[in-house]
Image (tube, rainbow, N blue to C red):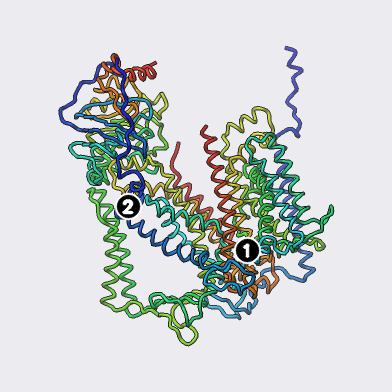
Amino acid sequence: MTEKKLESAAGDKLMIRMESVNKWYGEFHVLKDINLDVRQGERIVLCGPSGSGKSTTIRCINRLEEHQAGRIIVDGVELTSDLKQIEAIRREVGMVFQHFNLFPHLTVLENCTLAPMWVRHMPRREAEAVAMHFLERVRIPEQALKYPGQLSGGQQQRVAIARALCMKPAIMLFDEPTSALDPEMVKEVLDTMIELAESGMTMLCVTHEMGFARTVAHRIIFMDRGEIVEQAAPDEFFSNPKSERTRTFLGQILH
Amino acid sequence: MDTHIFKPDLKRPLLSVGALGWLRTNLFSNWFNTLLTLFSLYLIWLVVPPIVKWAIIDADWVGTTRADCTSEGACWVFIKMRFAQFMYGFYPHELRWRVDLTVIAAIVGAAPLFVRAMPRKLIYGAFFLVAYPALAFWLLHGGFLGLVAVPTSQWGGLMLTLVIAVVGIAGAMPLGILLALGRRSDMPAIRVICVTFIEFWRGVPLITVLFMSSVMLPLFLPEHVSIDKLLRALLAVMLFEAAYIAEVVRGGLQAIPKGQYEAAAAMGLGYWRSMGLVILPQALKLVIPGIVNTFIALFKDTSLVIIIGLFDLLNSIHQATVDPAWLGFATEGYVFAALVFWIFCFGMSRYSMSIERRLDRGHKR
Amino acid sequence: MQTTARVQPARSSLLRDPKFRGLVFQILAVFTVVGIGWYLFQNTQSNLAQRGITSGFGFLNNTAGFGILQSLIDYTETDTYGRVFVIGLLNTLLVSGLGIFFATLIGFVIGIARLSPNWLLSRLATVYIEIFRNIPPLLQIFFWYFAVLRAMPAPRASYEFFDAIYLNIRGLYLPSPIPADGFNVFAIALLAACVAIVLVARWARKRREATGQLFPTPAVAIGLLVALPGLAALVAGNPVTWSVPELRGFNFVGGLVVIPELVALTLALTLYTAAFIAENVRSGIQAVSHGQTEAARSLGLRPRHILRLVIIPQALRVIIPPLTSQYLNLAKNSSLAAAIGYPDLVSLFAGTVLNQTGQAIETIAITMSVYLAISLSISLLMNWYNKRIALVER
């Protein structure tokens, strides 16, 4: 992994704004007053113990989860229950899941062309060209005609990244993209993500890979019990955590 | 270093909680959902009030003859008067305590098997499996050790249904297990024999098997041998069910990881010992739900013995509905039969589901 | 080294050779099976000789001499047992086909209702499933036949629906279509509409792949299906006239009569099997993991596209195998017809023909072979299908 800190490329345009977002699962209060601004090109890593609400937070951004109070504005569009707006936002926001969620009945190429063809109304030829372009970027163009079940975990996750990229999203969400992978496959996925970061993509990433966070993130957000406990630039975050809760957490995962 | 003070949990905002919130999210979340709710309410209104009116409000409950059934609703007097026949068939009145005792013995005897902490369960279970059938046969059939014989032609009602189902499944188990093992054997001849047997029985309807047992079996056997009608039905049911049990057990055998077979072989266990001590105990535990489901299917299928003239629960009721003294109460009879069958089948299916959940949890641990 | 001399030479006894043992075991097994078969055959031979029954299939050419309640082909009492067999087989296929059609329809509706976010509807579906699958099918047949249809009024007091459908103790009377002048033109128009739909669907797919534009194929298809035959009917006149059942004296004339036995059997088998199909559909849809829906959503796919492109193709793989076995069960359960006297294969052939001819072995063997042939061919088809659609895994 490159030691050199990635160039800070965050622009001024506000891509995501969350204003005192609250969410409940039944009676359980999972997100408490989340306030978060993400600018264009900014790369944010969310970390925290399991059940702290970090996945829920990013899943609210593309409305896989519904928030009950507060406002979420993505690229100038406010998320309400309006289906048209939800669709518009989902077109702009790509997501990569912990368990890949590739469609097992479609080939790698078909996985990648499905949404461009049905959502962006791209001709097949063009969609396939786009798909091959991104499969090349994640370094598995030779697997295009195979089915997801025939690939290794790392390869599947790279396909999932390519699939999301094929929609040319403005923002990418990563929900623990390396947690379900065997150790030797983590690096290939992280490398892909670093390359993506270098291209200036706006990224929100839930991960426990602190090395990745240190090199790639502009900002690290630490969450616990449904709220943002602390946020800071990586150097600050690792060397001088403000809250005692953060320090305990770092002590547990950094050994 | 500051200590972060966590915010308190807040109540979910109103409108989405409580009875009102529940109604909103579950029944009236949008126009389509509302439409579905109204449609469902219409269906309920269409079906439930007439049934309740017929079965309870307008029904006749007291009396002894059909003359007592004067109202519009159901005549439960009919069921009441014939109840004993539905339960015991033509089993002699004064001997029916023997049937009751058999059932009580089954419940008391089997109860310890369901206590999870029971010590030496296996030994007790084996003893129960050997001793109970002998006891049950002595009580139900008699003819020795001081009990008067009651020929099977007098057996009937729910008692006969239970006898066929229980004996059928118990008899089918050993054969089914052997067939399952045979189907997974390395020996081609054994495999072919087992596959043929299994596929044959699974491919034909039980009714043709019962026909076969009643008209073909006498031809198959030497002239002087004649078998009891019930025994013929039982044989047919056993052979038929064995094929289904075999497929269920095969599923369990396939679910046992290969490592278990290898570990057993590595310990130097031969085929029968590794099956008996290592594989089957695990596989059979896995397939308990499947066996219970097979039993439910068999329990429902016992009603087919009507075809060969046995008086099981359904046939007893069917005969009662065509009795001139009680003509016109077929609905009551079949509803009662349905209720009895339903209670048994539904109860067993819940039991099988609960075991399945327990096994699932056991696996995850 | 001297010790090598004391090692046993590789001279193991045949008895301890697993291959040899296996062979012996197999030969023994085959001998036992053949022996039992031979024993049964011998007994049968002597029993048949004793009773003076000649075996063989010659009886199929004899005259049957009895009437049949329902026959899809022409039949008179002078026809042969062979023809009776065909009638029984056709009647079995008829009731199985009707049952499969309706059970699939109801089963899918209820299975989907079971997963509805509407609490009340999903509860109703559950109640339906739990009631109908836990009551023996034979009991359900009896209920519909003896308690409902046999209790219907005489033709004069029939239940009447839309002035065209009548239900009474003699059965269900439906209007039947009779081709009229415009029939040919209408049929051609209908055929043309079907061809046009196929062509449009093809063209729409090609265009979508080439330009990305979507085309409202379903709406156009429905439009074509209505417009073309409608136009034909306008131009060429009424395609069919309906023969509506009419009460004349004590009975109905005209229309199509469905005998109560068939109604009861179809109704019971449909409702019973639909409960199982509903469960298969539910578990098939639930087997598609939630992650699949989430991934499709996060890509911005519309709900109906998610259903069509992601959920249904995967759910069908899970649903179809158990669905086929439900179809098989239904076909086998159709033999319960014997209990209410619907002239299906078992009731006619293994029942009436057996009783008249005494050819127990032959009739039962033929009956069983028919079911076996159906079961085996469906299993083979299933295996082929499973191989074809199995998800490719490492």
Query: Which chain hosts label 2?
Result: B
Report the residue at 21% width, 36% height from top.
A73
Q: Position of residue C212 (x, y in %)?
A: 23, 48
Give C273 or A128, whichever is nearer the viewer. Answer: C273
Where, by quadrant of the figure, is residue C160 drawn?
A: bottom left
- Which residue is identified by label 1? B314
| Looking at the image, residue A52 lies above or below residue B70 | above
Q: What secondary structure is marked by label 1?
A: helix
Using the rendered image of the protein, determine whether residue B238 is visible from the camera's viewpoint. yes
Report the residue at 69% width, 45% height from top.
B108
| Looking at the image, residue A104 lies above or below residue C119 | above
Report the residue at 30% width, 31% height from top.
A32
Report the residue at 62% width, 42% height from top.
B184
Give C211 or A101, whichever is nearer the viewer. Answer: A101
Name the quadrant of the C terminus of chain C: top left
Q: Position of residue C372 (x, y in %)?
A: 59, 58
Mark 2 or mark 1, earlier in chain: 2
- Which residue is identified by label 2? B28
Using the rendered image of the protein, determine whether residue C90 is visible from the camera's viewpoint. no
Where, by quadrant of the figure, is residue B74 drawn?
A: bottom right
| Amino acid at dot 1 | Leu
| Amino acid at dot 2 | Phe
Label 2 and label 1: CA atoms lie apart by 44 Å
